[in-house]
Amino acid sequence: MSFTFNGVKRDGNGAYYYNDGDVESHRIPLSDQCYGDVRMSREQLEEWFGISNDTLPDLPAYYILPRLDSTWGGTAGGGWWNVTGDIVVYRPVEWVPSVARIRDFPKNSIVTNIEKERVETTTTKLYAKAEFALEVSAGGNYMGIKAEAKAKTETGVEFEKEVRNKDTYTQKGVVGDVALVEVAVGLMLRVEEIYTHNIKVWVDGREKSDSLGWHGGPGWNDIHIPSRALSRVGGLQFSKITMTGGGHSAGLYVQTLPVFDENKELKDLHIALSNVGWTDWYAYVAGKKGPSSGRQLLAYPNYRPSTTLMPLNKTPAKTE
């Protein structure tokens, strides 16, 4: 007999599943805070970038993502890694704008037509306040709640440079008397950590029956889960996970199964683990889990940063 996760619906064939409305979407408010090189008011954000409470997208009530660290364990069996950390559930709280000042055009150098042959902007600067980037997949994102983290660097969140060739701006009227500034605006998401499930395993890349293990909990036969039982919730699985430390996740697979109460509030989070080359899964019941707390700022690059030229006197200097 296979292991059973309590609190998650199962169909007639024993497969776990969720209904489309099990996770609600909510309107997330725009913060009064604005980070970056330039302080912009809500009115300016709406006037110049169309950013307001009415135009921002709704978000799922929760995001689930791994927060794991990988360190080299030793050379036995060809080499193995210790993987530790948590699977975390976040609740979105508010949108926080981040503004980067790209280039100034003094008024004595302004001409009627401003043509830029090439613009190169790194969004590391744009999202420097963020802990890491919340990467939400456009497809295969079950109920919208699966997310992953991009690595954090010492200077902020590291992104590839965005290059746009032959961007042309045309100013109408007399612009030689007005100093302009080019600014880019992106969005960060302030989230509240509400639940964690601790992970502490070792893993290697041999694709053998003993290539994944952990200490504590019942024996393998008591926690066995056939792959068919998870066939309808594959969108909540994680693999090739970005980690801190050595960053190597080998062949580790993580299946998450959130549990919701009658009010659609999250009350539990089940975890199953597998490894590349394995057919089935095993319930991970050894790790500590429960409610948690804390707030973080995450970069949200799915909301594409945009740039514009605007009069310098419309962008008050940032105050500390």
Image: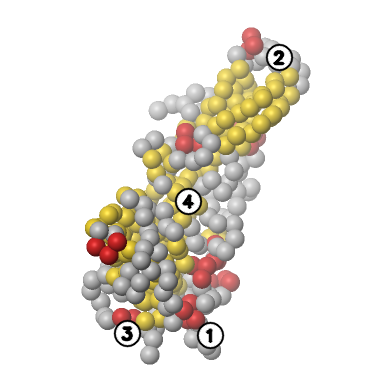
| Image depth: mark 2 or mark 3 in front | 3
Q: Sequence order check: which comes first, mark 1 or mark 4?
A: 1
Three-letter amino acid code of the residue under disc 2: Val
Which residue does the numbered mark 3 point to in the structure image?
Answer: 221
Q: Position of residue 295 (x, y in %)?
A: 38, 50
Q: Position of residue 126 (x, y in %)?
A: 49, 35
What whole-number distance in Å separates the C-alpha atoms at marks 1 and 2? Answer: 68 Å
Q: Which residue is mark 1?
A: 11
State the separation of the CA atoms marked 1 and 4: 32 Å
Residue extending furthest toward the top: 108
Q: Is residue 154 above or below residue 293?
A: above
Q: On the rendered structure, is 116 left or right of 19?
A: right
Gap between marks 4 and 3 measured at Cα? 36 Å
Using the image as rendered, state which of residue 303 and residue 226 is in the foreground: 226
Which residue is pictured at 24% across the width and 58% down the height? 74
Above or below residue 178? Residue 284 is below
**Could you tell whether 261 is left or right of 138 in the image?**
left
Q: Position of residue 267 (x, y in %)?
A: 39, 71
Q: Which dot, 4 or 3, sits closer to the camera?
A: 3
Tell me the element at label 3. helix
Choose top left, top right, bottom left or bottom right for residue 110: top right
Tag of residue 253: none
**Disc 4: which residue:** 134
Q: In what element is the residue under mark 4? A: strand
Cα separation, mark 1 vs mark 3, equals: 23 Å
